[in-house]
Amino acid sequence: MSDHLTGTRAQAVLRLAAEAPAKPAGGAALDQILIASTGAAALTAVLLVLGWGHRTGRITVLDRMARAAARGAGRGVPGWAALPLQVAMVSLLVALLGMYWDISLHISHGRDEGPLANIAHYPILIGLFGIFTAGVLAVVLPRGERPGAASVRITRDWHAPAGGVLLAGAGFYALLGFPLDDVWHRIFGQDVTLWGPTHLMLIGGAGLSLVALAILEREGRSAWRGPESEQPPGWIRYARRCMLGGGLLIGLSVFQAEYDFGVPQFRLVHQPLLIALAAGCALVAVRLWAGRGAALLATAFYMLVRGGVSVLVGGVIGELWAAVPLYFAEALCVEVAALALARRPLAMGALSGVLIGTAGFGAEYAYGQVAFRLPWTPDILTEGMAMAVTGGVAGGLCGALLAEGLAGRAPRRAVSRGIFAGAILAVSAAVANGLVIDVPQGRTATVTLTGVSGDAAHRTAGARVEFSPADAVDGPAWVTVTGWQGQGLHVDHLVREREDVYRTSEPMPLHGGWKTLIRVHDGRTLAGVPVYMPADPAIGAGELPAAARFTRPVQSERSVLQRELKSDVPGWLWAVCSAVVLACTLALVISLGWGVARIARRLPDTEPAATAPRERAGA
């Protein structure tokens, strides 16, 4: 009877594999690569023709668009800054929507049938190309003029704003992640995690482009020579800078997306680190740059956009809902610190970071109990707060340097470089600390299914789970059953019956394409026990059925969550490729730091105060 069932199951798997669309586990099909490459080349050619035509005076469409942008929402900055600012902001919104949509699809449906078969890839590509386009526009638009003292010389009579050059570089870096991602998959298999090196290129280039936009806005504001009657009211500049600050908060928060959806593949202490780092950098910068209340208004803009994306993806499109970290408590921390120390920006940034890492941590802890699929627990309390303080102080100091540089009041070069390098090292050490995990040997989990229902195509069941030996799980951050990639997401926090014995609170999926496992996060332990895994012919994996009762070892959950990864690739090759991506990322970050320093040196603080004036050093 058992042999008959096994044979029947195997026949069903083969039939489903033959009928289902192919989902490659490595690189994309060559025809899709050809189509995508042709499309990218065509768009790039159009952009180059427009740029060449503008520079030679044979095409005037960019001139007209720049003048229109400067008369509208871009008042107060020249057209060469106004048009790129508007194009980049719209592009970032499109890319953000596509990014959360794409993450949702991968969590609920698994791998793509091909890069062009995933509808969410199109807004990502359009958005990232739009960011690159905005940078190119800022570079080519200034004609017959030097766009400010901080501009970069390209030829004898062609100067480009530094912010435009950096914006084009950030957009190109993000776009480069797409072809490199395909190469990465061909070498290593698919790393189904947001934190894959090439995935971080995509979100890092887009998120950090906000710094380039802030530099471009400052250059444009300094270079504007319109008549006094056309001088825009101060609140326009104030609102624009609050939006840029809120945009930077959004960009830095995308790194948390796995936690937002409730399927993180890394320790929970990373989440408070990332929240505090984003809050410290973006909110301190905007508070010092724009003025009183700017941290709160930037957070309101963040909530409007980021919350709107969650509503669109989860409510309108009908995919998974992503939680939205609150950040209002962190904004209040920054505003409180500014009341006492706004005239001492570095001290204000450090104090803001400490408040964010303590009071802000507590607020997010409470908020997360109702907002996060995986709320914070006492298991991470001490280490999580320490990580949050590290991220908050490092981010606050970087935010203060950014604001002071944009205002033309940077500290001495040695001080700025030392603080910047120290912040990078501190964040790197904190991230590395979170990556140190332990998978205990000799532990097992005995699973007894309960309440089995449905046929083979719709099978669900509850379970009782007993870990062995004694004290195998003690005060964990989470013990859950997670089912994903079966056209949905199932996260069930197991109920503790007694020491080392847990039970499910709702039926778990054990059919179709669902990948269902028990996950244990206890201190530095990050491990899993597969319950049901479907057959996957693309990687040569057979089905792992869920028997009525079974005992399986507690193992590294990475081998379960990322079963598409190739196991025969030398470790040194992965390390070398990751190091190359890291070096490119550091080059982008350092380039942005160079841009801020260039603004500080060449555009001194001569601007009139905004409607909500910032407190000036020494005032």
Image (cartoon, rainbow, N blue to C red):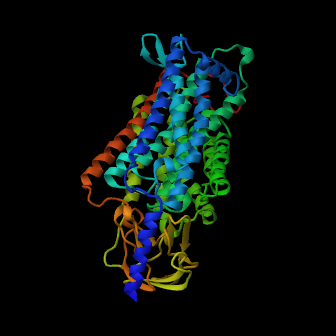
Is 27 in front, or is 521? 27
What residue is rendered at 52% in x and 27% in y? 409
Q: Is the residue 173 above or below the residue 12 in the image?
A: above
Is 573 in front, or is 615? 573
Q: Residue furthest right?
A: 229
Q: Residue furthest bottom?
A: 1
The N terminus is located in which quarter? bottom left
What residue is rendered at 41% in x and 29% in y? 413
What residue is rendered at 38% in x and 43% in y? 180
The C terminus is located in which quarter? top right
Q: Is the residue 51 above or below the residue 489 in the image?
A: above
Is 364 in front, or is 479? 479
Q: Residue 565: where, in percent of width, then height?
A: 35, 59
Q: Is the residue 340 above or below the residue 604 in the image?
A: below
Q: Residue 417: where, in percent of width, then height?
A: 40, 34
Residue 288 visible? The answer is: no
Q: Residue 616: where, in percent of width, then height?
A: 61, 30
Q: Residue 313: where, in percent of width, then height?
A: 62, 53
Residue 96 quadrant: top right
Horizontally, residue 606 falls left or right of residue 385, namely right
Residue 367 visible? The answer is: yes
Is 541 in front, or is 398? 541
Q: How many marks?
A: 0
